[in-house]
Amino acid sequence: MAKVWEYLFLNGEFAPRAHILAGLTLAQVGARPAGAPHSIYEELWHTEMWQRIVLERDAAATRLWEDDVLFPPQAAPPDLPSWQELVGAFLASSERAVELSQDEAWLDTPQGADNPGFTWRDALSQLAVHNAYHLGRIVLLRQLLGCWSPFPKPPLADDVDP
């Protein structure tokens, strides 16, 4: 079961999370293509904030959510190091989700009084779906901006020359 969580939070299905967020300029992460409600930066900011709320019960992030601040006040980070810090925080938190998932007993404990009957397994599953949605939006934004390189898939065993 441990590999499932790693797949859901770090490497699964469409592309490794680090690949989705790599190689972007400040202009690219702050751009909103025509018709897009959010930039890449805004999408990741929201996703990282929600991950902190779920995994860490982060008080500052929870207050933002309670005040209906679901996205940052600006479309772009102030500078490239701020973007890189956000990416690093998101990826580290994703790795933390995988670490937490290794404890089967913890996964089956109630998440808290605010979610009766909801276990940490439920919370991680919901968080993985939420992350996939927003990471998919980031891939779409990258495609619209012309800065997406699909992650190369490894060859199948039948395709490898002996």
Image (cartoon, rainbow, N blue to C red):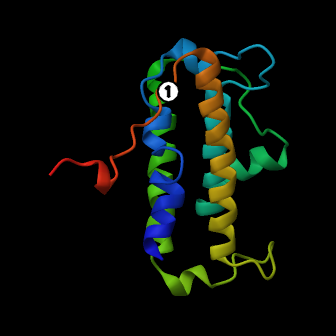
- The residue sitting at 51% across, 63% down in the picture is 97
Q: Position of residue 10 (x, y in %)?
A: 47, 53
Q: Is residue 45 among the parts visible in the rendering?
A: no
Q: Is residue 142 above or below residue 9?
A: above
- Identity of the residue furthest to the left in this view: 162
- The residue sitting at 81% across, 72% down in the picture is 114
Q: Could you say which is closer to the camera, residue 152 or residue 160? A: 160
Q: Position of residue 74 (x, y in %)?
A: 70, 21
> In what element is the residue under mark 1?
helix
Q: Is residue 118 above or below residue 79?
A: below
Amino acid under label 1? Ser
Question: In the rendered image, which residue does mark 1 sit on?
Answer: 82
- The residue sitting at 58% across, 79% down in the picture is 107
Q: Could you say which is closer to the camera, residue 18 or residue 120? A: 18
Q: Is residue 138 above or below residue 125?
A: above
Q: Is residue 143 above or below residue 105?
A: above
Q: Quarter of the image holding residue 37?
A: top right
